Image (cartoon, rainbow, N blue to C red):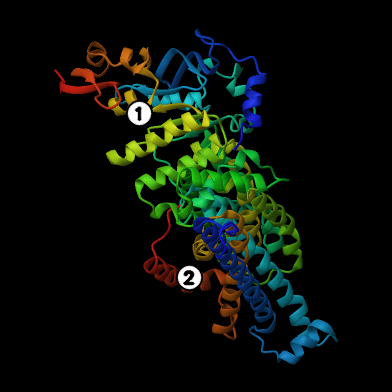
Amino acid sequence: MTVGSAPVVPTAGGRGRARSKRSLRRRRLIGLGALLVLLVLAVLASIAFGTKVIPLSHVWSALVAPTGTEDDIVIRSLRVPRTVLGVLVGIALGLAGALIQGHTRNPLADPGLLGVNMGAAFFVVVGIYVFGVTTLFGYVWFAFAGAMVASVAVFLLGSAGGRGGPTPVSLALAGAALSFLLSGLVSAIILIDTDTLDAYRFWNVGSLAGRDTAVAGQVVWFIVIGVLIALATAPALNTLSLGEDVARSLGQSVRRTRVLGIVAITLLAGGATAACGPIGFVGLVVPHVVRAFTGPDYRWLLPASGLLGAVLLLTADVVGRLVARPGELQVGIVLALIGAPFFIALVRRRKLVTI
Amino acid sequence: MTPNAETALAEDTQAPVGPDGTRVRLRAEGVRLGYGERVVVDDLDLDVLQGTVTAVIGPNGCGKSTLLRALGRLLRPTRGHVLLDGRKIDEMPTKQVATVLGLLPQAPTAPEGLTVGDLVARGRHPHQAWYRQWSGDDEEAVAEALAWTGISDLAERPVDELSGGQRQRAWISMALAQGTDLLLLDEPTTFLDLAHQVEVLELVERLHEERGRTVVMVLHDLNLAARYADRLVAMKAGRIVAQGEPADVITEPLLREVFGLEAKVITDPVAGTPLVVPVGTR
């Protein structure tokens, strides 16, 4: 090495930082790529497999060159809409879960925390009992209205008496209190009236079955707007994860972020529940799995949670169609049966992160 | 981080001037502070002068942290005002305040797995907008803040795996990357052993001397406060009992009045500042 022309050597720290920054980025890109591949596979499986066995060649021809055979009709008017709805609802539930955990900084929070599920259930029961609604199409609006009313009520209750908007704890308490109240009312109505009970219990098991394109069409815009708001608030959630005081001293309007977050959660979880009935577990578990490769950065965590939510919901739906032939198991039940042991294993393998 | 636009902005405004002609950066005017019905601080006036390190001392529950939160616009006074460079802080856009004034709460927590580099990068939030997420300036400010606190090597380590002293340096780096020339620190030495307390306060001293930062901090240790601050504010039960240079504030009668502590005050053999030697609480 000639003296006097020593090359500029980057500091070890700088070089190391650049290198491991790249590796973190690569890990996240590989993770997102893997989720996309899994989603494509889940979509294909959801179209190809069902209670009726259809050869793959028929599946293909039904998609590209339908001729009106029975198989074509099953594929095009049942499985494809069902798959589209599954993707939409899965994304919505995964995202809503990541949002509620981020806003409450509580790793066990679930979108149901805001009272969305019980609000929807109560309005559906009222719809059945008082207005005699019996179609899935009719339930959607009652359920969505119920989800909206419940989360607004929880927000107002949680803000009452507080300074500068609701705190995560006051929200969770208000959500729990309202959920108990509504669940008592739901029980009261279905005890009085067995017809309502019969109609309600089918809604109350979350399912993708029997929903036609009209149902997806009703909720798609709520979910799309919810997704856009959610993704736009990712940087704000990052700041908020340092604590409210730090977020505010960094110049963030915590109140605005919270309001946007609650609007997004209501649109997403409310839309999903309206379309399919209450589906638990996805919103709770998906963010935990995703954090393993995204870390705590919401700009990666949110999209990845949406994708994994869709993968999980479609997979559980396909499994439910295959295990109980010639009948099928509702996706809500499959998720609970497979999901709970899986979650316990996850908790035992690595400690749940504090967020 | 060269003298930046924020400093220029501060000089444009009609900032009030203190008794010796020094600019008043932060002023509390007859503020009443409390939580709900409970009043913690009442009718308090305070001036924070440009280029000073002020330490607020006082017994537990005297309202030190409450005052600091109000100065950092985290708590709105129910009466009176806090002025930042002569303007009511509550009427300024919060993001604009965040380019001039930074605050570190006591024992802040980072989400698990967040790296030091990412934590420090979040200090750039006030300089970003939806149309401008991350720029070369941000990158430079983060790298420099890391280097300045001596934690460049830790940039990829998760904050939760650091020792207490390293963690506090990471948070101070974040505040440094924020690029504010006013810094409020709420008990920055909590949970640290003595060596790390001194390390953090030396960092604060350098911030002041090398970066010209104006610092207000809440401290528990009177001897460290006397050594590292050039102004002390002693509080008791929500009001200011004494303020001024450490030697004028740390006196035996004041310790008796404010802390209920019998003590001898001698001269610190190292720094020449007052040194408190407790006798007892009776």
Instruction: Answer left or right for B222 relative to A127.
Output: left
Q: Label 1 vs label 2: CA separation?
A: 50 Å
Residue on which disc 2 sits: A339
Marks 1, 2 in one chain: no
**Residue A189 appears in view:** no
Residue on which disc 1 sits: B219
Residue B152 place in picture, x, y as percent: 48, 51
Residue A94 place in picture, x, y as percent: 58, 61
SS state under label 1: loop
Eye-nearest disc, 1 or 2: 1
Q: Which of A133 and B144 is in front in this view?
A: B144
Instruction: Answer left or right for A108 relative to A127.
Output: left
Residue B244 place in picture, x, y as percent: 38, 13
Task: Tell me which residue sits at (49%, 32%) in the image.
Answer: B210
Occupied quadrant, residue A31: bottom right
SS state under label 2: helix
- The type of residue carrying mark 2 is Gly
Chain at numbered mark 2 = A
**In the image, farthest residue toward the front:** A3
Q: Nearer the viewer, residue B236 or A144?
A: B236
- The type of residue carrying mark 1 is Leu
Residue A157 place in picture, x, y as percent: 52, 37
Q: Residue A47 carries which label?
A: none
Occupied quadrant, residue B200: top left
Query: Measured along the vertical axis of the image, is residue A185 above or below residue A137?
Result: above
Dot 2 alpha-carbon crowd within 10 angstroms: few under 14, some 14 to 19, many 20 or more: some
Chain at numbered mark 1 = B
**Residue B265 appears in view:** yes
